[in-house]
Image (spheres, coloured by chain):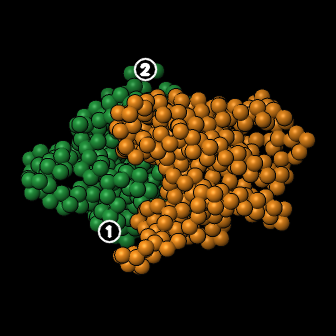
Chain colours: A green, B orange
Amino acid sequence: MNTQFWLIQAFNGISYGALLFLLASGLTLIFGVMRIVNLSHGAYFLLGGYVALSVIAATGSWLLALPVAAAVVAVIGLLMERIFLRRVGFDPLRQVLLTVGFAFLFQQAALDIWGGDNLDITPPDMLRGSTVLGGLHFPMYRIFMIATAIVVGTILWLMMEKTRAGAMIRAAVDDSEMARGVGIDTSRVSMFIFALGAFLAGLGGVVGGAFLGVYPGLDFEILPIAFAVVIIGGMGSLTGAAVGSLIVGLADNFGKALFPEISYFTLYAPMVLILALKPTGLFGRE
Amino acid sequence: MFLTDRGKLWTVFVIVLALAILAPFASAYVILLVTQALILAILAMSLDILLGFTGLPSLGQAAYLGMGAYLTAILATRYDFGLGWSFWVVIVLGILIGAATAALFGLFAIRAAGVSFLMITLALGMCVWGLAYRWNSMTGGDNGINIPARPKFGIQLADGVTYYYLVLFFFVMSLAMLYVLIKSPFGRSLVGIRERELRMRILGYNTWLHKYIAFVIAGGFGGLAGVLWAHLNGIVSPQVVVLATSVDALLMVVLGGPGTLVGGAIGAAVVVFLRDYLSTVVPWWQYVLGGVYVLTILYLPGGLMGIPARIRRWREEQAGPGQEKKR
């Protein structure tokens, strides 16, 4: 084990973390603003990948697939929130079961529409090679994943910190009752956040489709990992989602490389410890 | 339709009797399905102690099922243990490992409430899944462990009907023990904690300890279900401990009716029917399963067991105000 091993593993961990950030940033906002435990979030990720495959098959454009797939998933999320989730209220157990029910429905629909094979999204040629830096090969696609996460993260940060809408969202995270009291339409904020979260998950699904593949069962594989990110970082915190993604991405990669037999344990045990010792996570607020 | 406590006991007794008498006349496939449902019913009832009676929605109940099942498989394949009379020792060990795991997990989980409790039990369940999935040298990884044969000690458990009777025995024992538990003062105080924990604490109850003990007991019954599950299928794989199993267990309780014990058993029967029977008949069975989840949450807050009460309330409303209840 030399420097090269550590550098490559760290790079792989960071790029995987970048993908997780796309998924977890939406989940953490939904969690923080609406107190909704959304177990459909993995299904959104998977649907994003599938829709992108269809868009690519129809138009041949990978670049077009990115926004279209994300938008389609956003609409699905929006409808789910407006029609069903609003009726359930704040009982986390009922939210869990309702969203799991939808995850199963989406799973079956995906199976009916796209079949049960392992599919792969082919990225454009530009992103297929690798860059050599200091004698190390860095795949372009992983660099692209990191860049995407940085761009998305920056946009989200600017939106949250610098715009009126962002201020309203932060108010709703901190104290939703008080936010309503000062005239913020928290119902509209919730709707917007849920759609945004679904959008990001769909986008993650397209980006991840070339990296993890698109296959039945991916939804429930990635979902608990996204929850680990959200819990470690702290519910409702974007900074937390970013740091959590890095931690989980690195823990996952080094765990698999160094202690393969307990690699998932090394992922979820920190989640347990954080929940037990500091339930608000690293960056969450009371 | 609207039964007293004694009437309910009689109903359960008659149903169990019918299950016992009708078994030899049923096909092997039906026996298998009902056996599955009875084992998962034990798991669901153990979860009902937490969810229905104590108000703790655990999202990791499959972990105890998995611990019991893996213990059985590892003892059978590595040490050739538990395939004769020693099966009964494995039953005890299975209960103990479920309880011990819950005792460890409870130290972390019981402090949490609401969403945090859901998340921490999810994480604990995923820890067990991670070990089952990756710890190849111990668990066989993704392939799981094949158990050579069912135990035989005078009687042949390899026979489907015989095994069914064994499972039925454990189901009835579990139901009886859990029933006694919830009717005991301890069970009453669990309900008190569910209704208003603060009041119980002010009254001087150690609510943490009450919840912890309930958690450990539920783990023990989960472990028992795991041992039975391992020998029913002859194979134990990480599929036992996936998140979906824990979520299914929650659905069983909520669908049947939380806080009713037998509701969990009814829910288990419905879920097994959908997952293991309907899935072999139609390719779109998962629409039905997903639909059951959604409709249960939207329209059946009290579960199937809550339907009589809803009908009664509806009738009273129909009868109009001012009229005395006629019963």
Residue A210, image x, y percentages: 40, 52
Q: Is residue B92 visible?
A: yes
Letter of the chain that mark 2 sits on in the rendering: A
Q: Read off the residue under disc 2.
A: A2
Q: Is residue A19 left or right of residue B221?
A: left
- Which label number is shown at residue A124? none
Residue A91 in percent (x, y) is at 36, 53
For badge 2, the amino acid type reads: Asn
Q: Amino acid at mark 1?
A: Ile
User: Which residue was labeled with disc 1?
Assistant: A83
Measuring 59% from the left and 57% from the top, which residue is drawn there?
A: B5
Relative to A17, residue B167 above or below: below
Query: Is residue B224 shown above or below B13?
Result: above
Tell me the mark number nearer the camera, choosing from 2 and 1.
1
Which residue is at a point 43% across and 30% down the rendered structure image?
B206
> Which element type, helix, strand or loop, lies under badge 2?
loop
| Residue situated furthest right in the rendering | B154
Q: Chain of mark 1?
A: A
Q: Are marks 2 and 1 on the same chain?
A: yes
A15 lies left or right of B189? left
Task: Locate residue B136, reporting x and y percent.
Answer: 62, 34
Q: Who is closer to the viewer here, B185 or B278?
A: B185
